[in-house]
Image (cartoon, rainbow, N blue to C red):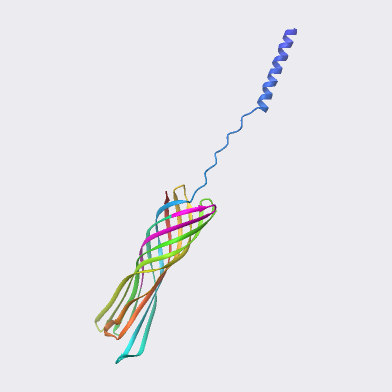
């Protein structure tokens, strides 16, 4: 009996020890690995499409000459609203410092932005207009990250593009016209937002105001045998576009 009692006591003590080990001895629970933060730094390329619109402002002066002196000047002016599709490609590079992102971007755009107006007076009819054939920009960007993958930014820099201007008049069946195109350099500024879909792809939307400056497109005899004069124009326009970027 003594042996049975001793054996039973030993078994109970052993079971209690194992139970204590089960309660107080354990391996640390596995932890989930930290997800790496998204990095905006690096080069990227992309495509964009959108819509543009603005106002073509054309002005002309006709000089009434007698002998070698101008005795009077007749001025004409028109402001014509136009719009059209735009689409193109962009490339750039970003540097990130905390929640601030600095960058440079350049783009080239096809443009269908066109403005045209017509006028009729008795036997005279005429039209005047202009078109932005293409344009591009090279801009600095500075952005802020409200969230790791979402950036809002301001942007601005140099703009360049080719503008076509034309005027045509018909008087008593006789038609005469002038047209010219020229590559101009101006400036642009705007703002946008960009969201990183994953580690490579991001989606952006952007607004830009662009001014390609003023240029004289006709100087000398005006339409239909008129006196000497000069005509100039400027085209300022707004664009809104969406784009898709791929970061290397």
Residue 142 appears in the picture as rendered:
yes
Q: Is residue 217 left or right of residue 203?
A: left
- Residue in the foreground of this view, choosing between 178 and 143: 143
Q: Is residue 2 above or below residue 62?
A: above
- Residue in the foreground of this view, choosing between 111 and 103: 103
Residue 205 spot, x, y in % from top left: 46, 58
Q: Is residue 89 left or right of residue 168?
A: right
Image quarter for residue 126?
Answer: bottom left
Residue 185 spot, x, y in % from top left: 38, 68
Residue 209 appears in the picture as rendered:
no
Q: Is residue 127 above or below residue 22?
A: below
> Is 183 within the magenta?
no
User: In the image as oriented, which residue stretches furthest toward the right?
Assistant: 2
Residue drawn at point x = 69 percent, y = 18 percent: 14
Q: Please, what is the dominant secondary structure of the magenta stretch?
A: strand
Image quarter for residue 109?
Answer: bottom left
Q: Is residue 23 left or right of residue 60?
A: right
Image quarter for residue 23?
Answer: top right
User: In this picture, which residue range is highlighted in magenta?
Assistant: 93-115
Residue drawn at point x = 44 percent, y = 54 percent: 93
Q: Is residue 54 above or below residue 99?
A: below
Q: Is residue 37 left or right of residue 16?
A: left
Residue 236 spot, x, y in % from top left: 41, 71
């Amino acid at each position: 009996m003594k042996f049975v009692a001793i054996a039973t006591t030993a078994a109970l003590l052993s079971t209690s020890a194992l139970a204590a080990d089960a309660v107080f001895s354990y391996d640390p629970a596995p932890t989930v690995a930290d997800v790496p933060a998204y990095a905006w730094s690096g080069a990227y390329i992309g495509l964009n499409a959108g819509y543009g619109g603005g106002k073509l402002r054309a002005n002309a002066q006709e000089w009434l000459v007698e002998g070698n002196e101008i005795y009077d000047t007749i001025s004409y002016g028109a402001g014509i609203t136009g719009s059209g599709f735009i689409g193109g490609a962009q490339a750039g590079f970003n540097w990130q410092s905390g929640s601030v992102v600095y960058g440079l971007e350049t783009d080239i755009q096809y443009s269908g932005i066109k403005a045209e107006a017509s006028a009729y007076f008795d036997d005279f009819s005429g039209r005047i207009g202009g078109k932005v054939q293409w344009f591009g920009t090279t801009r600095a960007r500075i952005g802020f990250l409200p969230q790791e993958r979402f950036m809002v930014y301001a942007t601005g820099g140099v703009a360049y593009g080719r503008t076509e201007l034309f005027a045509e008049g018909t008087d008593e069946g006789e038609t005469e016209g002038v047209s010219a195109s020229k590559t101009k350099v101006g400036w642009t500024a705007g703002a946008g937002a960009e969201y990183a879909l994953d580690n490579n792809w991001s989606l952006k939307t952007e607004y830009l105001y662009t001014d390609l400056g003023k240029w004289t497109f006709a100087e000398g005899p005006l339409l239909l045998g008129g006196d000497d004069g000069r005509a100039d124009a400027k085209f300022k326009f707004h664009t809104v576009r969406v784009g898709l970027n791929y970061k290397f």
